[in-house]
Image (cartoon, rainbow, N blue to C red):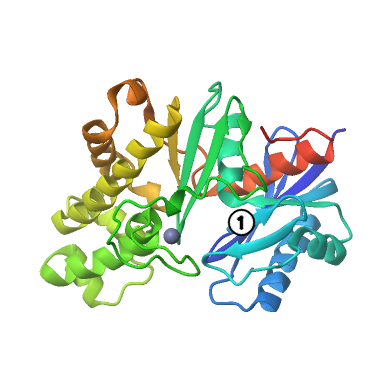
Amino acid sequence: MPGRRVIGVDVGGSKVLAGAVDAGLAVHHRTRLPVRGLDPQLLLQTVQQAVEEAIEHAGGEVIGVGFGIPSMIDRRTGVSRLAINLELGDVPFAALMSERLGLPCVVDNDGNLAALAEHRAGAAVGTDNAIALTIGTGIGGGLILNGRLYRGSIGTAAELGHIVIDADGPPCQGHCPGRGCLEALASGTALEREAVRIGAEHPDSGLGRAVAAGTDPLGPVVSELAWDGDVPALVVLELIGTRLGTACATLANIFNPEVIVIGGGVIAAGERLLAPARAEFARRALPPCADGVRLVPARFGIEAGMLGAAVLALSELDGAPTSA
Ligand SMILES: [Zn+2]
């Protein structure tokens, strides 16, 4: 039907992005609102406001809403069981939003949806087995196995940000009880922490000056400085990239994928991040498992979760399941 739209919504640790999307995945409107530090009621209210704004400017009939949230979702009940970096524990998210918006709503983990978008129309098109890592406040993960999303027994699979790369490493962030997780060591949050440490050691560098000035957010500045050749900024990205490569080696050994797609805000650093990741990956992965595996940037960047939420809504509201 021409003019038919869904709203794809990506609820991140720091912002919510709602897009009005058509069946060809063209985006007709985007609304962004900040959510960092909000309590559950205010968070739901802000998400609702973003969706309502997107509906208002959708330019066509809105038939439903897909949500990607950084939470483990029990697919049997639609309940958000545990979110690492937001207050979304034990919230029946899809039912609540459906009641507030008066539209059919579907929900899935944001990392799963980023993988779905990249597989449907992005950097993993045409592959049977693909892995997506979305690096922002935390690290989201998604698995495409045999051409379909893998969600595990109850729907909470692919928390790839919580594979352990240092058994004695620092405590993980938010509500994760683990330590030494990839998320604790290579997320945007970890990148900023390392940037503050390394910047303070080199006060006369561009990074040192940015740290001394209290630059916030610091992550995008690290990328910009690295592209300008600032050595401490490059050291930060090499450290984070190397840790990513370590995790990618483990993932390749388990899944033998065709491609590992790296997305989220941190991928603005591009090859400054990916080159050290590939080098460490080549050092660590079992050669037959790693043979031909491509480590590539996400096509949809910070919009992958929003577009994946739209794909989920378009598929599931048409009765086409996305799971393996
Ligand atoms: Zn963790």
Say which element carries label 1.
strand
Q: How far across and how far down the image is residue 49, in percent?
A: 73, 68
Determine the quadrant in which ligand 1 lies.
Answer: bottom left
10 Å neighbourhood of mark 1: few (<14), some, or many (≥20)? many
Left or right: where does residue 276 sit relative to residue 302?
left
Front residue of 295 and 141: 141
Q: Quadrant of residue 150?
A: top right
Q: Is residue 10 visible?
A: no
Amino acid type at mark 1: Met
Q: Is residue 138 visible?
A: yes
Left or right: where does residue 120 sit relative to residue 237?
right
Name the residue at 79% across, 56% down.
Answer: 55
Q: How far across and how far down the image is residue 266, in percent?
A: 39, 52
Quick check: is the Cβ at mark 1 less than 8 Å away from ligand 1?
A: no
Name the residue at 14% across, 54% down.
Answer: 231
Label 1: which residue?
A: 72
Total labels: the figure holds 1
Name the residue at 21% across, 57% down.
Answer: 233
Left or right: where does residue 157 sit relative to residue 94?
left
Instruction: For the C terminus, give its image quadrant.
Output: top right
Name the residue at 56% across, 60% down.
Answer: 12
Query: Is 266 rendered above or below residue 21?
Result: below
Front residue of 202 and 181: 181
Q: How far across and how far down the image is residue 62, in percent?
A: 84, 48
Q: How far across and how far down the image is residue 319, in percent?
A: 84, 35
Instruction: For the N terminus, give its image quadrant.
Output: top right
Front residue of 58 and 235: 235
